[in-house]
Image (cartoon, rainbow, N blue to C red):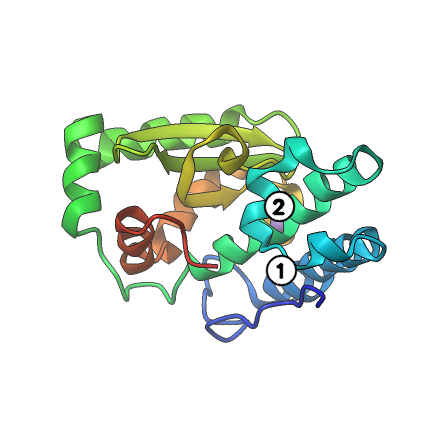
Amino acid sequence: MTFELPALPYAYDALEPYIDKETMIIHHTGHHQAYIDNLNAALENFEELKQMSIEDIIKNLDSMPPSIYTTLRNNGGGHYNHSIFWKIMAKPGTTTPHGKLLNKINETFGNMDNFKQLFKRAALSVFGSGWAWLVKDKEGNLYIAATPNQDNPLTCGYTPVFGIDVWEHAYYLKYQNKRADYIDAWWNVLNWDQAEKNYVQCKPDI
Ligand code: MN
């Protein structure tokens, strides 16, 4: 069994005007596909690892064979992160914060505006390429985290609720060097229904 590119749950232009169609096509069919191709190539001679889910590979990175550890971390991470990312976005204006997650955000961060400011600060703090995340621990407590490259909080025992890709390939065509503008715009495409699901489930949908 090999890993395959998951279909987007919406059209390439569905996130316009906040994320443009061309960026989505390149990001999905170019970048994500490349992570998957590299991941499959690395696993070619490791039959037992091919039976594992991508979550389990990322969760257990430290016990992966040293010869393919870096490839799994970068490209397995790339596959996992992007699989979460496509699902956590939706057509603008179709979802709003609600439910257990909204309550916990208010309880943890005071209010939504304060949370968004702290999350933005984390996303801006990533030097070079990486991600900002809202994660939970086993008790359902929320934390904001940033990871470099294609690392995922799952490797450190935290479960992602949602994350924003702040690699330049995610925004450069439309926003160029203005990462802050991309982050501000991204709230319009966050799928709060999926975020709520990810929060109440034991792992995020991919
Ligand atoms: Mn990306």
Q: Name the residue tied to disc 1.
A: 23
Q: In which quarter of the view is residue 193 placed?
A: bottom left
Closer to the camera in the image, 131 or 188? 131
The amino acid pointed to by label 2 is Ile
Question: x, y percentage for residue 113?
Answer: 23, 34
Q: Residues within 10 Å of mark 2 (few under 14, many from 20)?
A: many
Question: x, y percentage for residue 184?
Answer: 40, 42
Residue 81 visible in the picture: no
Question: x, y percentage for residue 112?
Answer: 21, 37
Q: Is residue 120 above or below residue 186?
A: above
Q: Is residue 124 above or below residue 4?
A: above
Q: In which quarter of the view is residue 111 placed?
A: top left
Q: Quadrant of the N terminus?
A: bottom right
Q: Is residue 88 left or right of residue 62?
A: left
Q: Which mark is residue 57?
A: 2
Closer to the camera in the image, 23 or 4? 4
